[in-house]
Image (tube, rainbow, N blue to C red):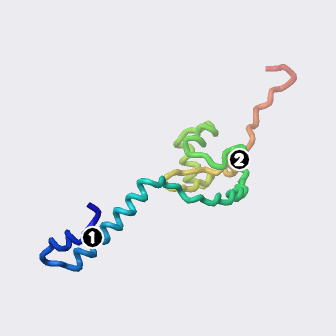
């Protein structure tokens, strides 16, 4: 049964215009569904997007091959001194330490300067005469 023909319209005791409009919309929807079922869907052709621009060259920051700063533990091992001695040098101001969050760091240049400031060891010379 395709829709409301004359017979169906005559059978309706109370004709409401909204029901007639609803049936018209339903017929239209059924027609569209039939078209969808008979004609396969073809996706619209998409334009190919332009190729992406090459990424900008990253900024390269060259760091020296040696470390820039040492933690307390690393400085202790590098200098060959104890933890107490290292903290005493920091407290005396002989070594300058900086804070990065909760970490205490000693700059490599500070360690080099401190080592250079140490006096050379003088050995007691032996006499070449051989007398004891």
The correct choice, above or below, for 119 with respect to 27 in the image is above
Position of 15 with respect to 48 (left or right) is: left
Residue 104 in percent (x, y) is at 54, 51
Q: Which residue is mark 1?
A: 23
Q: Which quadrant of the structure image shows residue 66?
A: top right
Q: Quadrant of the N terminus?
A: bottom left
Residue at x 27%, y 66% (from the top left corner): 3
State the residue at coordinates (71%, 54%): 61
Label 2 packing within 10 angstroms: few (<14), some (14-19), many (20+): few
Residue ID for mark 2: 112
Q: Left or right: 4 with respect to 107?
A: left
Q: Residue furthest left?
A: 13
Which of labels 2 and 1 is toward the front?
1
Mark toward the start of the polypeptide (2 vs 1): 1
Q: Identify which residue, 78 or 65, lies in the foreground.
A: 65
Identified at 60% across, 43% down, the residue is 75
**Mark 1 Cα within 10 Å, few/some/many (few <14, many 20+)?**
some
Vertical position of residue 1 compared to residue 105: above or below:
below
Q: How much space separates mark 2 and mark 1, taking CA atoms?
A: 93 Å
């Amino acid at each position: 049964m395709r829709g409301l023909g004359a017979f169906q319209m005559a059978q309706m005791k109370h004709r409401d215009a909204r029901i007639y409009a609803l049936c018209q919309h339903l017929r239209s929807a059924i027609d569209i569904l039939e078209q969808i079922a008979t004609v396969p869907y073809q996706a619209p052709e998409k334009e190919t997007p332009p190729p992406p621009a090459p990424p900008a060259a990253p900024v390269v920051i060259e760091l020296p091959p040696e470390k820039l700063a040492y933690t307390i533990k690393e400085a202790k091992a590098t200098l060959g001194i104890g933890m107490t001695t290292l903290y005493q040098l920091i407290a005396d101001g002989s070594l300058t330490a900086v804070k990065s969050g909760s970490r205490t760091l000693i700059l490599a240049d500070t360690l080099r300067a401190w080592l250079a400031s140490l006096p050379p060891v003088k050995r007691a010379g032996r006499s070449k005469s051989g007398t004891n």
